[in-house]
Image: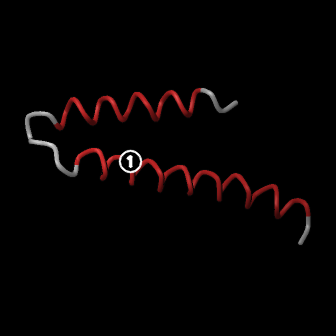
């Protein structure tokens, strides 16, 4: 496999893994939450995801 193919596949794979992890994090966080607390939990999860993405440069 050529280097240019790897240069395309690796970032796509990393992005896919990060997206799946974010979805699983939301599912676990919201699982046993009452409806009135869901907005707060989702806001906190969004802040965590933003922090993780921000540190990735």
Furthest-front residue in view?
A: 32
Classify residue 38 by image quadrant: top left
Q: Residues within 10 Å of mark 1 (few under 14, many from 20)?
A: some
- Residue 20 screen position, x and y as percent: 47, 56
For the C terminus, the image quarter is top right
Left/right of residue 8 with respect to residue 44 in the rendered view: right
Image colouring: secondary structure
Outermost residue on the right side: it is 2
Instruction: Tell whether 29 sits left or right of 6.
Output: left
> Which residue is situated farthest in the bottom direction here?
1
Q: 16 or 8: nearer the eye? A: 16
At x 22%, y 52%, the residue is 31
Which residue is at 49% across, 51% downward?
Answer: 19
Locate the N terminus by quadrant: bottom right
| Callout 1: SS | helix
Residue matched to label 1: 25
Q: Where residue 17 appears, x then y in whole percent?
A: 56, 56
Q: Residue at x 30, y 52 (%)?
A: 27
State how many labels appear: 1
Which quadrant of the view contains residue 48?
top left
Q: Is residue 57 above or below residue 27?
A: above
Q: Is residue 35 left or right of residue 40?
A: left
What residue lies at 47% left-to-right and 52% top-to-bottom? 21
Q: Position of residue 55 (x, y in %)?
A: 62, 27
């Amino acid at each position: 496999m050529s280097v240019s193919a790897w240069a395309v596949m690796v970032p796509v794979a990393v992005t896919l893994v990060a997206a799946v992890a974010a979805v699983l994090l939301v599912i676990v966080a919201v699982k046993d939450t009452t409806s009135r607390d869901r907005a707060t939990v989702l806001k906190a999860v969004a802040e965590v995801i933003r922090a993780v993405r921000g540190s990735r440069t």
